[in-house]
Structures are given as structure tokens and as C-alpha cells.
Image: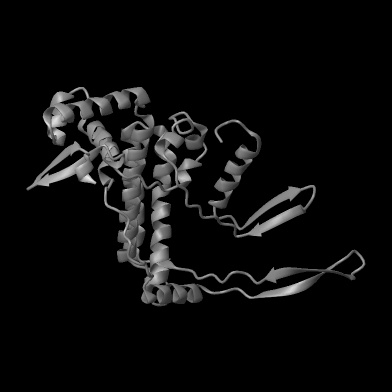
Amino acid sequence: MDGHGGNMALWRSVLRRMDDTKELYQYETIGRGIEALHKPYLSLLCNLTPMDMAPFAKQDSKLWGDGFLARFAFSVPEDTDASDREYPREQFTIPAALITDLHNWHVSLGIPDCRIESDLDAKGKEKGTFHAVPSPLPETTYTLADEVWASYYAYDRALRQLMKHQQAAYLDGSYTRFPAKALRIAALLSSLHSGGKHVIWPKYWARAQQITERWRVELHRLVQQIHAPQQEPGQRRTLEDALLKQVRQRGAQTLREFGLFHKAHSREEITGVVKTLVAAGEFVITETGRTTRYDLVTASSH
């Protein structure tokens, strides 16, 4: 998708247009003629790793430069967020109150009507095929409370000041869009909780800004992971072997003890390798009071 042209370049262009809140999007093909989308929008939920993005999201990448990546919100966990807990076995049920609230929200937003009409040929005769004619989507206009107007522009000014000092021009597109993203979230919260009052109140803006600020932190976390030098698989395997050898020779070890013998590696790096060995069944966790130790898995451990 990064500068190779073809279908992928067109796909990227379409995604950008879908986020620009235009009234109309038109595209013409030889086979289907002109196709029109009124008030187009598109929501995507994607899952990929920093390693997947690394070849395409360098600082000089067109994906930053044309605003493509800036239109996404990234959720990036820290290494310490990993958990060894098993997936729950209990039956999962969605609370009835949640279903009711979402249904009521759906109805309150408005449901367009739709009628079916026959397709006609050039002479006005029915062709035996049909097409749907939907009515325009209902729209509700929300106004901003005075405090929200002030908070919006204060947030925008603060981010622009940060842009000047952080010397990361490739992130400017993301920073300039954060206030608008926060306003979108605030509007959603207002439509869900305001009880028919079409005003975006400060409490909705405050929550929305909190969410976008978390996205901003996680954007920098993503950039740090993408631009960090990647460790060679052979080097990681060497560290795994060294930790296994240390436990065989010295018995169960803590993360601190691992670090004392491998000072060339960061605590985060060692923690990641230890978690991999636990997940692979090489290490077993033993708890002694407040101390966590890692030991070799033996037949009695199973």
C-alpha cells in the first residue's frame, strides 16, 4: 500500500475519502457506469502487529504523509500488559440491559424507510428486476455547550504547541485530527446518554478527550515499537537458552536475578523472553510470599 500504485493505492485513496464526511462520493466504471454514495462513511476494526506495520510506516512513509494512518486510532498494549491467565470457561452472556439500551439508541437515531421499485428499460417497460430506493437517513443536529467550545479549541492549541516542540512532522496529521476525533466521540456519548437533549455537555467532552489522549499515548508507543531496532531471532533464541541454562545451574530465578547475569539486555527484553518460555511450557511460575520465581517444568509440574 505504500507507493506501489495499482489497486492498493486506489484502496488507500477510497479509505481517506470515506473519512472526510463528504456529502457525495461518485465512482464510474465501464461495466456499472456511475455509482454514487450519499453521505459515505466506513468504520474499520483491524488487528495487526507492529512488525506487520514496520516496513510501511517509516517516518518518511507516504502513509503518514497523505494522512492515511492519521485517520486511524491505535490501541497498543505495553509488554507488561500480557497475562498468563487462562481463558474463562464460564458461559458468556450479554446483559439484557445492554441489549435494550443499544436497541433504544438505534431506534432513537432514526431508521430510514425503503421502497422497492421496478427497473425500466429505455422505453419505460418493466425489465423484471427491481431496485431499492431508501429514504434519506434521519439526521439530528447537536450543539456544543459553551464550555465544550472553549475546551475544544484549548485542546487544539495545546496539541499544536506540542507539534512544534516534538520534532516529529510525520505525526502532525494525527495530532491535528485528535480534536475532531474527540468531538466525534463526545457526540456519540451525547446521543447515547443525553436523553433526547441535543447538546454536547462538558462531561461528554471530558470523557472523549480522555479517550483520545490515551490514543495519543498509544500512537507514540506504536511508533517506538515500529522504529526500534528489531532483534534477530537468533539473538532471542540465544537469550532463551542462556536463561534456561541459568535456571538449570542455579535453580528457580527471579526477574531481578536474570537481569544480574544478563546486564546487556533490558528488563523489558528479559521479561518478554521469560513470558515466552512460560507460554511454551519451558518455565513454571512459583510464588513465595511476594516473590515470583521461574523454574524448569518437570513431570511433577504437570
Q: Please tell me whether residue 131 is drawn above or below residue 43 in the rendered image.
A: below
Question: Which residue is nearer to you in this view: 154 or 9?
Answer: 9
Q: Is residue 120 left or right of residue 202?
A: right
The N terminus: image quadrant = top right
- The quadrant where residue 286 appears: top left
Q: Please tell me whether residue 192 is drawn above or below residue 152 in the rendered image.
A: below
Residue 223 x, y percent position in the rendering: 37, 35
Residue 287 x, y percent position in the rendering: 12, 46
Q: How is the image coloured?
A: one colour
The residue shown at (53%, 51%) is 19
| Res 142 seen here | yes
| Res 194 seen here | no
- The quadrant where residue 299 appears: top left
Question: Which residue is nearer to you in this view: 91 or 200?
Answer: 91
The residue shown at (32%, 23%) is 235
Residue 290 x, y percent position in the rendering: 8, 47
Residue 214 x, y percent position in the rendering: 31, 49
**Extreme residue toward the front, this view:** 299
